Image: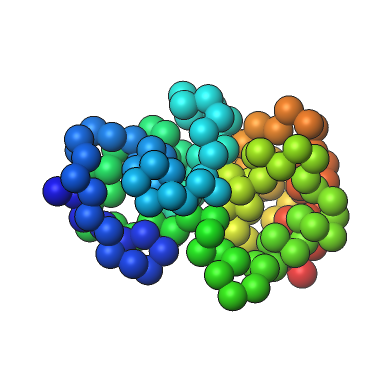
Amino acid sequence: MTKFTVNDRPVQYRLDPATPLLWALRDASNLTGTKYGCGNGDCGACMVVVDGEAIRSCLVSIAEVEGRYVTTIEALSRDRSHPVQQAFVAEQAVQCGFCTPGMIIAASVLLRKNSDPSDAEIDAAIRNLCRCGTHPRVRAAIKRAGR
Ligand code: FES
């Protein structure tokens, strides 16, 4: 049995310890805000926060997060929209929206460390792919959220 914390709640999974965290979250916990894009660590659609760092959950097994704290996109808007989510709406930084949860997770971690990131710092931190080409608006949303 693998035990860790997801969105402030203890979880126990009777899954193969090698199961990717992404699938435990989506299939066993029904936290489907975390998206499956590439499964190879390239797109960032599957990003979650583990102990304060944004990680690609398709690349991490549940055994690797044993005893750790995982936060998914669902936790960011538990009571009301997170400031990063509000900024994404205000800047219309969403087109199809598939990449958005991962973008918001990565942005929230960046802004916790640096509330006034430069364009270069945003580009370095947000390596997520968006086929709709929203990156300029995402950059604007991150700057807005940092204000
Ligand atoms: Fe994990 Fe693309 S699904 S990086």
Figure quadrant of residue 58? top left
Q: How many marks?
A: 0
Looking at this rendering, what residue extends furthest in the bottom direction? Answer: 79
Q: Nearer the viewer, residue 131 or 80?
A: 80
* Depicted 3 relative to depicted 136: above or below: below
Figure quadrant of residue 5? bottom left
Q: Position of residue 101 (x, y in %)?
A: 61, 48
In which quadrant is the C terminus drawn? bottom right
Residue 106 visible within the image: no
Figure quadrant of residue 85? bottom right
Q: Nearer the viewer, residue 84 or 78?
A: 78
Residue at point 28% right, 64% down? Answer: 10
Left or right placement of residue 62 versus residue 114 in this view: left
Q: Position of residue 89 (x, y in %)?
A: 80, 57
Residue at point 27% right, 58% down? Answer: 11
Q: Nearer the viewer, residue 65 or 8?
A: 8
Q: Nearer the viewer, residue 34 or 111?
A: 34
Residue at point 78% right, 31% down? Answer: 132
* Depicted 134 relative to depicted 147: above or below: above
Q: Position of residue 66 (x, y in %)?
A: 22, 51
Left or right placement of residue 43 versus residue 67 in this view: right
Q: Position of residue 131 (x, y in %)?
A: 73, 28
Looking at this rendering, what residue extends furthest in the left direction? Answer: 1
Residue 46 visible within the image: yes
Colour mode of the rendering: rainbow
